[in-house]
Image (cartoon, rainbow, N blue to C red):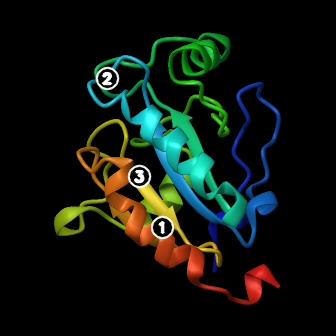
Amino acid sequence: MTRLHDLTPKAADGAPYPLAQHRGRVVLVVNTASKCGFTRQYADLESLWRRHRDEGFVVLGFPCNQFGRQEPGDAAEIARFCSLTYDVTFPVLAKIEVNGPATDPVFAHLKREKPGLLGIAAIKWNFTKFLVGRDGRAIRRYSPIVKPTGLEADLVSALAVRNSATA
């Protein structure tokens, strides 16, 4: 059975980014965009990351340009925007696709584990979020309208769970 930790997406510089490095952590995977109405969520994502990273939490941002072309920049432009506008310090990886034939394996996996409403797997818009437990299994999927602060109770519960992945 595949788990999130078995996958290796690309870092912003194109190098492999093995998710095995986050084994035993709670992970929030988010498809992001710099020119979206939900872009302000970067601030709340960064706040969650700073509050809980020492407890074994990581946010992973995956820029995506599939929705209204709201992430047109290259890796350097995206990194500059995130840093200068929202002081983002959590990992922002390579730009990907979350739907269609070129769907990144991370999102293909998460959509299989946690399809959306009515069992529809497709990502509907930027800032869809997946909370993944320490064991590498998806716990819950959140729509873009759910602010990162709105999932903090689920995050705290997930952080409280200890299992063999943390041993």
Name the residue beneath numbered marker 3: 129
Residue 58 position within the rendered picture, expressed as x and y whole percent measured from the top left = 64, 54
In the depicted view, which residue is nearer to us: 50 or 30? 50
**Left or right: 16 with respect to 10?**
right
Task: Name the image quarter holding residue 78.
Answer: top right
Residue 3 position, x and y percent, is 64, 71
Please determine whether, in this image, residue 120 is positioned above or below residue 1: above
Residue drawn 49% across the image and 55% down it:
108
Q: Amino acid at mark 2?
A: Cys
The quarter holding residue 89 reads top right
For image coordinates 40% across by 41% down, the residue present is 100
Q: Quick one: SS at disc 3?
A: strand
Work out whether 23 lies above or below 98. below
Along the viewing direction, whichever of 42 and 99 lies nearer the viewer: 42
Whichever of labels 1 and 3 marks the residue nearer the N terminus, that label is: 3
Q: CA distance from mark 3 to mark 2?
A: 15 Å
Location of mark 1 (residue): 155
Residue that appears at 83% across and 85% down = 167
Would residue 112 appear left or right of 126 to someone viewing this image? right
Q: Residues within 10 Å of mark 2 (few under 14, many from 20)?
A: some
Residue 160 visible somewhere in the drawing? yes
How many residues crowd mark 3 within 10 Å: few (<14), some (14–19), many (20+)? many
Q: Amino acid at mark 1?
A: Leu
Q: Between tags 2 and 1, which lies in front?
A: 1
